[in-house]
Amino acid sequence: MTFRPTGLLYGVVLLSMASTYTHAAIIPWTDNTPSALAPFAGQANSLASLAGSDMVFYGHPAQSLSLTTAKGLRHYKHMRFQSAALVVPASPDEVKATLSNYSRYVGLFPTLTQAKVIDQQGGIQQVRYHISVPVPIPLLSFNEDVVMQHQLSGNSLSTLILDSPIPYGAGKFEWFALANGQTLVTLTQWGDLDQPKGFLVSTLLRAMPEVKLGIPQGVNGFVLESLRRRFAPDASNQPALSVQNIVPTLRLTDAQLDTVQRLVDQSTTPVLFAHRPVWLATRTKPEQLHFVTSIGNLNAPLAQAKPLLANPSNYATLMRQVKRVDTTDLPNGQGQRASIHVGIGLGVIDIPFRLHMRYQPQGDQSVRFWANGGDIEFMQGRMQFDALSPQKTRIIMTSAGKIGDHAPLLLRMSKAMPYSDFLPSLGAAPVLLDKANRYLQKKP
């Protein structure tokens, strides 16, 4: 399940990039970012087939890295790049033209209001971006800058962070021609979230350090969702679906599921699929939901792993933000009703709210859940548990959530952030699985 106010923190990290950077000469650097195709033996078609009509997110194995920065070389012994991939109905030349025209990032990426090249040398350019996000609480409004250095070469665009509250990081876009005029677009990036600067970002990451696990996927999702909407916008006349069939089912072949499991095992992070938006029928108007399917490992046998996440009574044990859970068993084995009391402390602000949920078994190894009241009006999902070995369980979780028009003010405030109905679901799975595995590791 997903706690929506985390979207506020993702938005802060993505958008609050205050700059004290003064202009410096172009910094020569060698991009050590791995190719997004590295786990696929360099085969673009394999990754494109896995993504299908969705976006797919996956991690790379841990590696050491020497990173060029504005303050010299920094060395990291144990870090992981995260990649994301999307197939778009555009040619590689169209993708390249879009990604290499930095001034037109304004209008492509939400909240970006200015992009100015401040230095150039050959195919390398330094660009200052200005970001503005007004929210009802002035303390959390954004009107900030970030400086990046871009290097265009062949079918890739490498980026080095020069100034930001997340001051050290690098990544690159790649694009690969596919059949029928389509293109596979990938983004691979990493940032040092343990070295933030600036009051707001530092305070929020101290208050909720666990969200560091979901921020890389959130960054990739923000960027690729913007590209998806540019190259493959959604139809506006989709029919509303009923509550019963709203949750999509990820369809993978056995070979693709084996590939996903290999990615999970090698990176120790879940693989995520962001589905195209669908519509939920409600009493008043259709609501669009953006589902995410996550596939990851729980390091425990099925008999121990399933009740840990399928029973909402355990959430207060797993997550310190959950203050209390009141449950009622439904008759005839129809599941449980749960009232979940949550308190999100962001260091500068506290957000209390309540979730009213229903959990219903679907067969032996699957649980369906949905919101039936409370401060978050729209939430739907399903968890499936599969035994991989006597001591390991795979969880496949599909979920979506959306804050409605009648939520408390502090919750509605997060709707000012870009893609507030999508990024929290994307970032929640890595956090939840990590918390569950940490609990299982300590459990005797």
Image (cartoon, rainbow, N blue to C red):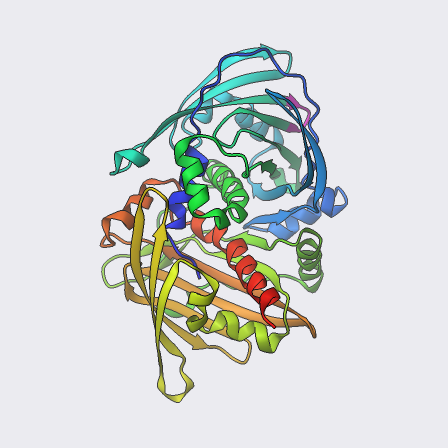
Asked if 294 appears above or below 208 in the picture, the reply is below
Q: Residue 216: percent from the left, percent from the top?
A: 54, 43
Q: Does the magenta stretch include residue 124?
A: no
* Residue depicted at x 50% and y 53%: 275
Q: Is 18 in front, or is 96?
A: 18
Dividing the picture into quarters, in which one does residue 180 lie? Answer: top right
Residue 155 belongs to the span the image colors magenta: yes
Can residue 276 be seen here? The reply is yes
228 displayed left or right of 299: left
Looking at the rendered structure, the number of numbered marks drawn on it comes to 0
Q: Horizontal and vertical percent for residue 408?
A: 24, 52
Q: Is residue 267 left or right of residue 239?
A: right
Return the x and y of residue 132 as percentages of the image width and height: 35, 28
Q: In this view, does 184 lie above or below 390?
A: above
- The reply to whether residue 241 is visible in this rendering is no
Q: The C terminus appears in which quarter of the rendering?
A: bottom right
Residue at 42%, 76% (x, y): give it: 360
Q: Which quadrant of the figure has residue 11?
A: top left
Residues drawn in magenta = 152-156
In the image shown, does 409 or 172 lie closer to the viewer?
409
Q: Position of residue 331 (x, y in %)?
A: 36, 87
Quadrant into which the N terminus falls: bottom left
